[in-house]
Image (spheres, coloured by chain):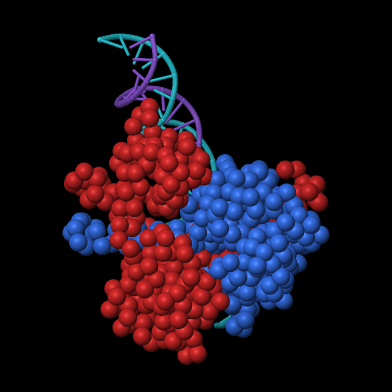
Chain colours: A blue, B red, C cyan, D purple
Amino acid sequence: MSQQRNGSTSGSNGSGPNGRAAVVGVSLNGDAGVELKAGVSESFFPDLPEATVARLPEYLRALHHLADTGHDTVSSEGLANAAGVNSAKLRKDLSHLGSYGTRGVGYDISPLIGQIEYILGLTSRRAVALVGVGNLGHALAGYAGFTSRGFRIAALFDADPSRVGERINGLVVKHINEIAVIVKAESISIAVLATPASAAQSVADQLINAGVTSILNFAPCVLSVPDRVDVRKVDLAIELQILSFHEHRKSARINGGLRG
Amino acid sequence: MSQQRNGSTSGSNGSGPNGRAAVVGVSLNGDAGVELKAGVSESFFPDLPEATVARLPEYLRALHHLADTGHDTVSSEGLANAAGVNSAKLRKDLSHLGSYGTRGVGYDISPLIGQIEYILGLTSRRAVALVGVGNLGHALAGYAGFTSRGFRIAALFDADPSRVGERINGLVVKHINEIAVIVKAESISIAVLATPASAAQSVADQLINAGVTSILNFAPCVLSVPDRVDVRKVDLAIELQILSFHEHRKSARINGGLRG
DNA sequence: AGGCGCTTGTGAACGGGTGCACAAATCGCG
DNA sequence: CGCGATTTGTGCACCCGTTCACAAGCGCCT
């Protein structure tokens, strides 16, 4: 309990370095979930294993790609290949969403996209605040992937007065002491933290105070947050260091002539 | 086998979305490792669990921070807090490196830093190539964390002729058709991919051809690579979508009045 | 020198996730 | 209408990782 999850750099498999504090998937508490199904497919909320949740976005991306290239259905094998997992795992993951496949045929792409987007809460475009418009933050503010995949950057903040007022992608950078007002006014629940590590904890506290309950943290530090707040961490240097380990291991096996 | 690892956004505990292809930690093959210990501490290569490897960089960061703030030793409890894990896990992780702690006292920070840096292959600054100097790539090229934590950006590439020749942080952007020559000349084994998804596979192939054996992939797609090549993936939209799921779940529990 | 408190290192139980292998179901064709 | 090919859905066994709980070791104080 009380671990932070690493972010998309991998996490090598779910496996990723952990930070401290916010629990993300740990306390999913034990609902059966399935019997909550109400209508056809649009209003139940199953209890998904955290590992499955982490793979759904990849399935979604692969499905969109298939749909764009003119496909109507896919087999588990085909979708698994496109998403980089094995087919048994994919079938088990999808089975948790309810049944969207037809034996002997495969999965209907379009309703499956709808179901995954519903589960992920992407039916309406979510507002996101971005704090820290430095080197990295500036790039994130202009990243098209955010807007094309279900999100809308609704506010930009920075602590540096010389940056406040700058216009990026049609948005004006505000000072961080306006976080409380703006976040509340726009009902923002997700924030991206791209500040220096030294400022991250303080900014996180302000965001949480203002009502933010999910944080994507790019600062190389551990955030301390209440249990109800989810934190995912992306640390580029950590990803490289993990790769470095494997490089080191490879060369050790060659130079040292170790068995392997 | 043949999964890609997600990167630092975290992987929920190891758990993170998987891509396809490169095995990173799977085929560590079964060396005992320990009996290889030769000198005092500088020349053996233990077989570490992949989950442990993914946490070592976080320990390293925390240790540097402690050292900078004047500490000489830490208890497992103290270091665990600083790294955001629990102390039992930390002790087990460190026990795999050999014994650097003293019962009743704690761990000596300085030698422990040395040992972790050695294991991670950070004793000499590793050269990294960065491909794709667009929005995100440009920011990565200027990211101080790379240089301050064991890496050196040795080359920049882009496919866009109008970008070739541009100077970023003292480095001139080269055209991607120079990848083979430059990567070989500088013996670069790690590359960061910040191209559009449509170009990623082709660029990856060129990099691998030129001798690169580790790739940090920021493009939202699955790379297909030989087994000997390690791939870690960072997808910012996926991280947000995972957070979105938890937001959706939280609000479903409130609005729907579900037990939980 | 001896004992006490503190902290590491680890054996063992536990839990989640993965992958195999097969039964169940659907389609198409003769 | 029935059969065979195909593909989903899942029970089961295995494995990795986590966590607990405690024994072993170290330093300090008397």
Q: Image quadrant for the N terminus of chain A?
A: top right
Left or right placement of residue A132 versus residue A14 in this view: right
Q: How many marks?
A: 0
Location of residue B203 with respect to A213 vertically, above or below: below
- The residue shown at (69%, 74%) is A167
Q: Which quarter of the picture shows residue A71?
A: bottom right
Residue positioned most to the front:
A162
- The residue shown at (59%, 61%) is A194
- The residue shown at (51%, 49%) is A18
Name the residue nearer the viewer: C17 or A186.
Answer: A186
Q: Which quarter of the picture shows residue A227?
A: top right
Location of residue A182 with respect to C30 vertically, above or below: above
Percent coordinates x, y for residue A97 in the rendering: 65, 59
Location of residue C10 with respect to B16 vertically, above or below: above
Percent coordinates x, y for residue B18 in the rendering: 50, 63
Report if residue A155 is visible in the image.
Answer: yes
Percent coordinates x, y for residue A79 in the rendering: 54, 71
Name the residue nearer the viewer: A104 or B151.
Answer: B151
- The residue shown at (39%, 71%) is B153
Report if residue A117 is visible in the image.
Answer: no
Percent coordinates x, y for residue A246 in the rendering: 34, 60
Left or right placement of residue A249 versus residue A3 in this view: left
Left or right placement of residue A208 versus residue B18 in this view: right
Residue positioned most to the bottom:
B161
Location of residue B212 with respect to B172 vertically, above or below: above
Q: Image quadrant for the C terminus of chain A?
A: bottom left
